[in-house]
Image (cartoon, rainbow, N blue to C red):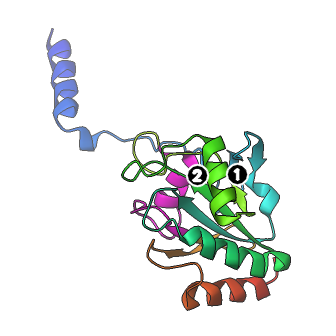
């Protein structure tokens, strides 16, 4: 009886002081250090491993069709056309997380981008970049990259070097054609993979 009371007391102690119970670290399902471990669905519904982009400089951006920043599609396309032959790619991820500004289906988004902005860079299927249904790619970007923190709005940009490391983040209001962005892209393109 005394032993039972003692065991109950110890269990009760740890129940009210959980910080003293050793916690096992959760296993991360995210790739260490870069984005190449993710496979994404293209706007056409095909699986695309991001490892296909190894050795290229990338600009990852969450996009929307009904946003005040939507005209940045034109700037993105301009930068893409200027640098794509040197190993530069844009990966655009439509998202409806901010003010319901991307309500369309993948087909509608593709049509909008093609008709209005003649987009030729890579578009992916619509995903969530924050909240409970956040896509694992953006969970990695916002928690394990050197630039942690929630995505603030549409057209937030992440620059990725030739080794798959996120090396810069630009807010929505910074255009892809701004000097800071272009200079960083050009510097990364000069680096060997």
Question: In the rendering, at what x and y percent does residue 46 appear?
Answer: 77, 41
Q: Can the viewer see residue 85 in this picture?
A: yes
Q: Is residue 188 above or below residue 153?
A: below
Q: Is residue 189 left or right of residue 62?
A: right
Which stretch did the figure color magenta? 134-157
Q: Secondary structure at mark 1?
A: loop
In front of the other: 63 or 54: 63
- The residue most toward the front is 115
Query: To which residue does mark 1 refer?
Result: 37
Question: In the rendering, at what x and y percent does residue 112 appear?
Answer: 62, 53
Which residue occupies 70% across, 51% down? 37
Q: Quadrant of the N terminus?
A: top left
Quick check: is 141 in the magenta stretch? Answer: yes
Which residue occupies 18% across, 19% down? 8
Which residue occupies 58% across, 40% down? 105
Q: Is residue 87 left or right of residue 150?
A: right
Q: Quadrant of the C terminus?
A: bottom right
Q: Nearer the viewer, mark 2 or mark 1?
A: 2
Quick check: is 154 in the magenta stretch? Answer: yes
| Label 2 vs 1, first from the N-terminus | 1
Question: In the rendering, at what x and y percent does residue 17 appear?
Answer: 19, 38
Count of numbered marks: 2
In front of the other: 21 or 52: 52
What secondary structure is the magenta-colored segment mainly?
loop
Query: To which residue does mark 2 refer?
Result: 137
In front of the other: 60 or 70: 70
- The residue most toward the right is 85
């Amino acid at each position: 009886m005394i032993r039972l009371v003692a065991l109950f007391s110890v269990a009760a102690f740890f129940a009210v002081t959980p910080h003293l119970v050793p916690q096992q670290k959760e296993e991360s399902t995210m790739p260490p250090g870069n984005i190449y471990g993710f496979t994404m669905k293209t706007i056409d519904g095909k699986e695309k491993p991001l490892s296909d982009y190894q050795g290229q400089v990338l600009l990852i951006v969450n996009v929307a069709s009904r946003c005040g920043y939507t005209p940045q599609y034109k700037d993105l396309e301009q930068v893409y056309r200027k640098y794509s032959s040197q190993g530069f790619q844009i990966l655009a991820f439509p998202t409806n997380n901010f003010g319901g500004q991307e309500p369309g289906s993948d087909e509608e988004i593709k049509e909008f981008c093609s008709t209005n902005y003649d987009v030729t860079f890579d578009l992916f299927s619509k995903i969530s970049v924050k909240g409970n249904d956040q896509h694992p790619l953006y969970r990695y970007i916002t928690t394990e990259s050197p630039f942690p923190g929630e995505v603030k709005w549409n057209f937030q940009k992440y620059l990725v070097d030739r080794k798959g490391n996120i090396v810069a983040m630009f807010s929505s209001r910074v255009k892809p054609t701004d000097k800071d962005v272009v200079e960083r892209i050009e510097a990364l393109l000069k680096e060997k993979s």
